[in-house]
Amino acid sequence: MYSGYNSGPNMYPGAPMPGYNPTGVGGYPAVPPQGYAPQPYGQPPYNPYPSAYPPNPYGAQPYPYPNVAPTYPQPPMAQPVYPPVPMANQGVDNYCQILHSAMKGLGTDENAIINVICNTDALQRAEIRRRYVALFGKDLIKKLKDELSGNFEDTVVGLFMTPPEYDAYCLYKAMKGIGTNEGVLIEIIGTRSNQEIQMIKSEFSNNYGKPLEKWVSSETSGHLKKLLISLLQANRSMNTMPDPMMCQSEAQALYMAGEGRLGTDESTFVRVFTQRSAAELDLISRSYQQLRGNTLHHAIDNEFSGDTKKLLHTILEGLQNPAAYFAKRLRDSVEGVGTNDSRLVRVIVSRCEIDMPLIKQEYRRMYGRDLVYDIRSDTSGDYKKILTYLLTRV
């Protein structure tokens, strides 16, 4: 995670950089609040094959890549409109007061809200949200929804949720009402770890009164449904030392279930893709190519279609190189005419404190473009301002 203190011109001097606070510095508890995982939510999956990552085109530094300075002049940011806020003792209360003042009376001080967000991490914002209710008798999320609107509202509200709460919220929005946004289910369920899946399920059940598996089961069908329900069991192996013989056997089983027969035995693909660890799937993929001369991705394209194909690709890509997967999701959001703002917000909010430096680096490697520049070109106003903050502060 991130460490140290930031005294840049666009932050409150002395405010801690985003990250988990293991020592209790700055008035925040040394352990996470009750119910929050002790490890960073969304930590990139273990990859035992660092050579599988593409070479760093910006030097010899190992992953994670350092932040790459944008190639365009930095635009002026919103300057703090309040004096520095001490984090010790009453730091949380002071941030609550800033938010309350920003939304009091006519109009809203969006700059103040942005500055609070960009000086705090997810755990600290969760504490601010809890304390806000005690101080002012109002739910902060509801207050923000009343005061803000559009994509800026979606971004701010998401950042004041805990990561598993936000994932559950996105899944709920994707399934409520008429129709289902299968792409959201594929992105979230297909890329989260066992621990994260369990936390999302707990949040979903608590907040929406129905188990996530039942909701997914009623909103999907066929092989996509089988894959999603299997992933929601959170039974993926945690083995980081794969057995080469076993992986060769699994590669052969996938061949015999797909390209090696007439028709497709989907159950074998479901079993392997939902139960094998990241390290095992990576070696299975390599073994498949050595044994059959073409990639496992090619086999998926030959044997599946539609959302099932997308989910299988997501599982494989999300485990082998999550930064590249999310870089592609962001590129798809801004490429061409129009912007997929819901996807753009979802990916940035969920990844900005996890692996955004890697995503930015992968984006430049894959597309030869600067991610911040592309997003700034497709957004405007306070929405543009907060996304720029989130992308450049790391």
Image: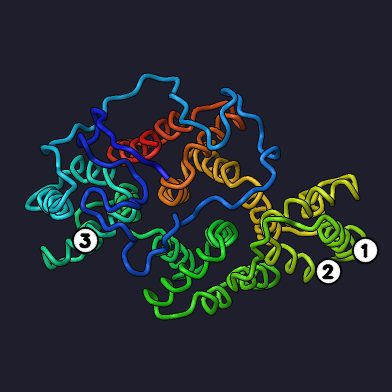
Give the image location of residue 119, x and y in percent. 26, 43
Identify the residue at image location x=44%, y=70%: 177
Disc 1 residue type?
Arg
Quadrant in the rendering for residue 57? top right
Identify the residue at image location x=14%, y=38%: 84
Give the image location of residue 148, x and y in percent. 23, 52
Residues at circles 2 and 1 in contact by the CB criterion of under 8 Å = yes
Quadrant in the rendering for residue 59? top right
Residue tagged 1:
261
Residue tagged 2:
265
Q: Quadrant of the C terminus?
A: top left
User: In the drawing, does residue 14 fall left or right of residue 44?
Assistant: left
Residue tagged 3:
140
Residues at circles 3 and 1 in contact by the CB criterion of under 8 Å = no
231 relative to 111, above or below: below
Label 3, label 1: how many angstroms apart (C-alpha)?
57 Å
Q: Nearer the observer, disc 3 or disc 1?
A: 3
Disc 2 residue type?
Asp
Quadrant in the rendering for residue 247? bottom right
Disc 3 residue type?
Leu
Query: What kind of element bears circle 2?
Result: loop
Count of picture labels: 3
Of label 3 and label 1, which has the lower sequence position?
3
Identify the residue at image location x=93%, y=63%: 261
Query: What kind of element bears circle 3?
Result: helix
Q: Which mark is residue 333?
A: none
User: In the drawing, does residue 14 fall left or right of residue 391?
Assistant: left
Give the image location of residue 12, x and y in percent. 20, 36
